[in-house]
């Protein structure tokens, strides 16, 4: 769902011409699908691997078990476009209940893929991986803002840190470079990917409007007023392309976001106006508890407007909204480092979100609001 045409701020960075072959691991997710599409539209040969089958994509997709290193090695070594991989984009992720389980599962994914590529003899030059605000402790409450890449690690274990350590060690052993990108609140759309702030807001608004209700912020008053920022998925995909080839990005970590900050109290009235809804003061609630009870309302909208029929439980991860709309501390990271290194793309978040909502309506993911 790239919409960069006539979008001020996207395109400020000159991206590399095709010079190798790209493998996107986790191409079915939000970040991975945008990265694969960005590379493919720029003319790079692109392959993607994930567990589920992806129909009608702009790159060559393979369905495989990423934890089966032997099978992965066989797939890579027997497929010309995979055997020649020079650029790996690692966007795979497994959700687990505890930090220890997260580390075990996600480290295993990365190690399996790196081993598979090494054993297949790929000429790997660069790996791009994704981290996020949890590296600074935003999931714990208040943290030092604006957070910088040079900030010390947290004392508690986290898979961002362990994966980074794995990459640093393997980069030295296997002769490739890497870049870790740290986005926040990635916005875009990928089918069957519920970890998506855009759909949290859009589906919540659609159901509210269908019920004749105003647009209310469903979080705390304090969260309504804190500073926040997001990262557009297409901007992040462009940063991924830049990082894969820029000398200044080798073995570095970069915060990546749209370049502005906002308060939900500024955006929520704009959302209401855009959706043709009345605006009302915030009302704290649990989306995860409330919205599943309204699945029948969404199903009614799907039938009436011929929307993409995604099961409601797979459409939106309401816990994402609950976390962000109840987070009562500023969540701001500095992007000075990435701009000094050469990535200059920026976006006005309010304008971009409204663009994305319109595109979701056009693609029949959301119902018409007007």
Image (cartoon, rainbow, N blue to C red):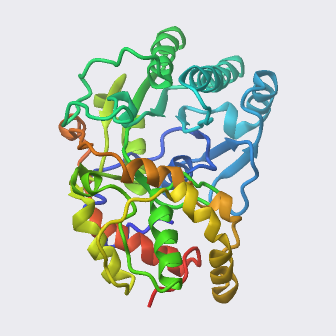
From this view, report whether residue 59 is shown above or below residue 365. above
Residue 94 position, x and y percent, is 63, 35
Residue 321 as seen in the image, left or right of residue 81: left
Q: Is residue 8 visible?
A: no
Closest to the observer, 36 or 29? 29
Residue 185 position, x and y percent, is 39, 49
Closest to the observer, 203 or 171? 203
Number of numbered discs on residues: 0
Image point 28% across, 75% down: which residue? 270
Residue 245 position, x and y percent, is 39, 35
Quadrant in the picture for residue 339: top left
- Quadrant for the C terminus, please: bottom left
Closest to the observer, 298 or 84? 298
Quadrant in the picture for residue 232: bottom left
Residue 206 as seen in the image, left or right of residue 143: right
From this view, report whether residue 269 is shown above or below residue 54. below
Q: Is residue 81 visible?
A: yes
From this view, report whether residue 222 is shown above or below residue 70. below
Quadrant in the picture for residue 293: bottom right
Image point 47% across, 55% down: which residue? 42
Image point 49% across, 62% down: which residue? 200
Closest to the observer, 258 or 156? 156
Image point 27% across, 18% down: which residue? 152
Residue 236 as seen in the image, left or right of residue 265: right
Residue 226 position, x and y percent, is 22, 51
């Amino acid at each position: 769902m790239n919409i960069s045409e006539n979008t001020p701020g996207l395109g400020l960075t000159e991206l590399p011409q095709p010079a190798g072959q790209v493998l996107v691991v986790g191409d079915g997710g939000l970040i991975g699908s945008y990265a694969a599409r960005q590379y493919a539209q720029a003319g790079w040969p692109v392959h993607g691997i994930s567990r589920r089958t992806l129909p009608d994509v702009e790159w060559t997709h393979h369905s495989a078990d990423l934890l089966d290193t032997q099978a992965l090695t066989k797939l890579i070594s027997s497929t010309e476009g995979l055997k020649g991989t020079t650029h790996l984009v690692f966007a795979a992720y497994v959700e687990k209940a505890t930090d220890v389980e997260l580390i075990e599962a996600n480290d295993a994914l990365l190690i399996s893929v790196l081993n598979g590529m090494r054993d297949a003899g790929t000429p790997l030059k660069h790996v791009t991986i994704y981290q996020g605000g949890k590296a600074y402790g935003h999931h714990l409450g208040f943290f030092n803002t604006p957070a910088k890449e040079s900030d010390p690690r947290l004392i508690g274990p986290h898979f961002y840190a362990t994966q980074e350590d794995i990459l640093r060690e393997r980069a030295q052993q296997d002769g490739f470079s890497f870049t870790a990108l740290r986005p926040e609140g990635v916005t875009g759309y990928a089918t069957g990917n519920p970890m998506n702030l855009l759909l949290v807001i859009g589906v919540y608004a659609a159901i509210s409007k269908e019920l004749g209700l105003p647009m209310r912020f469903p979080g705390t008053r304090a969260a309504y007023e804190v500073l926040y920022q997001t990262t557009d998925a297409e901007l992040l995909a462009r940063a991924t392309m830049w990082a894969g080839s820029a000398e200044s990005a080798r073995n570095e970590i970069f915060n990546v976001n749209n370049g502005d900050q906002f308060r939900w109290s500024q955006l929520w009235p704009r959302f209401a106006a855009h959706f043709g809804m009345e605006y009302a003061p915030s009302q704290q609630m649990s989306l995860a508890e409330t919205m599943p009870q309204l699945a029948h309302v969404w199903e009614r909208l799907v039938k009436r407007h011929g929307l993409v029929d995604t099961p409601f439980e797979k459409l939106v991860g309401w816990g994402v909204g609950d976390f962000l709309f109840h987070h009562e501390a500023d969540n701001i990271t500095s992007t000075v480092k990435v701009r000094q290194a050469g990535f200059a793309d920026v976006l006005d978040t309010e304008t971009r979100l409204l663009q994305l909502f319109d595109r979701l309506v056009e693609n029949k993911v959301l119902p018409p609001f007007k």
